[in-house]
Image (cartoon, rainbow, N blue to C red):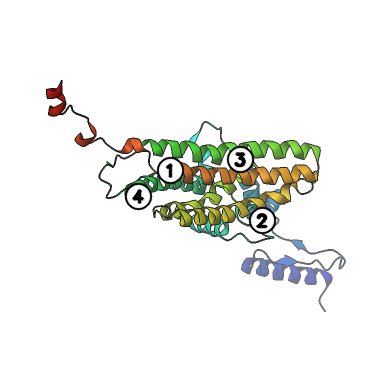
Amino acid sequence: MATVDDLKFQEFDAAANLLAINPDATTISIDDPSEKPKSQRRVPRDTRRDEDDDLLGNDVSDKTELLAGQKKSAAFWTFEYYQTFFDVDTRQVLDRIKGSLLPIPGRNFVRLYVRSNPDLYGPFWICATLVFAIAISGNISNYVSHQGHPNYHYVPEFRKVSIAATAIYSYAWLVPLALWGFLMWRNSKVMNIVSYSFLEIVCVYGYSLFIYIPTALLWIFPFESMRWILVVLAMFISGSVLVLTFWPAVRDDNRRIAIATVVTIVLLHALLAVGCKAYFFDTPEKSHATPTPAHIQMPSKTTTKAQ
């Protein structure tokens, strides 16, 4: 009959063989059945915690580093600071252009297209394209309107490019700046007013001008009735984008102030459209007509003889 010492020796021998096969195996002593299993190969507590952090904490640490990197903004005089304003892909630009051409009531342009990633890429190139479209179309329109007139001599007006650039970029930057300052001031007075960032407002104004690019190209045709119809249509589409975007921002304000703000936005927008049509596509001045020798009065021979 096996004694207790023999049982312990057998247990030790079996445990040794088991550990030889699998070093991570656990053993249980028969002296105290209530004792919890103990690992024969202990791992320090700190090391195991580090392993858990590697398995479960990497994503958290990566997110923390990412958020920290996002919070760190470069200085405004560096290239990296302005690079973030042009971080947009072609699909987003096309979606925002489509949104500016198809304003739908109840769909806010900022919340639907801009708020996730406002950009300056689209507004900058839309304004640049509009500048050249208006200037070139205006010159072509003047040439087409007076083609065949013997007293008209075509002279390209390059100054129209600088005038168009001044008007359009001033409107696309100064008006949003004034509107942003006004909304910030009213937000300090009324708590329910929706606040937009300056970049978001510039983005809305820039994309709202896209409709005037094809409109300016169609203004080449010298039909005044068609031109005014195109002006009204373009003002209605682009103005609707502005009204549907900024009315929710001021509707909780005083009724008169809210209406006056929206009316001012529409009037400034209409002033730009009508001003561009009237200045760049009006009838050329008579000074463009070059004098011909027939216009110069020369003393006739009969008059000289009479004298």
Image x and y of residue 3, in percent: 83, 73
Give residue 41's quadrant in the image: bottom right
Quadrant of the image containing the N terminus? bottom right
Instruction: Identify which amino acid the numbered label 1 is placed on.
Output: Phe
Secondary structure beneath dot 2 equals loop
256 displayed left or right of 56: right
Quadrant of the image containing the C terminus? top left
Could you give the CA–CA distance between mark 1 and mark 3, rounded to whole angstroms? Answer: 24 Å
154 displayed left or right of 86: left
The 10 Å Cα crowd at callout 1, few under 14, some 14 to 19, many 20 or more, is many
Instruction: Identify which amino acid the numbered label 2 is placed on.
Output: Asn
Secondary structure beneath dot 3 equals helix
Q: Earlier in the sequence, mark 3 or mark 4?
A: 4
Q: Earlier in the sequence, mark 1 or mark 3?
A: 3
Q: Earlier in the sequence, mark 2 or mark 3?
A: 2
Q: Earlier in the sequence, mark 2 or mark 4?
A: 2
123, 289: nearer the viewer: 289
Which mark is on residue 108? 2
Nearest-to-viewer mark from 4 and 1: 4
Residue 194 shows up from this direction: no
Secondary structure beneath dot 1 equals helix
Q: Which residue is mark 3?
A: 176
Could you give the CA–CA distance between mark 4 and mark 1, rounded to whole angstroms? Answer: 13 Å
Could you give the CA–CA distance between mark 2 and mark 3, rounded to whole angstroms? Answer: 17 Å
Instruction: Name the residue located 25 percent from the left edge and 35 percent from the top edge.
Output: 291
Instruction: Name the residue located 78 percent from the left edge and 37 percent from the top edge.
Output: 188
The 10 Å Cα crowd at callout 3, few under 14, some 14 to 19, many 20 or more, is many
Q: Which residue is mark 1?
A: 280
Instruction: Name the residue located 61 percent from the left edge and 47 percent from the top edge.
Output: 66
Image x and y of residue 151, in percent: 27, 42
Nearest-to-viewer mark from 1 and 2: 1
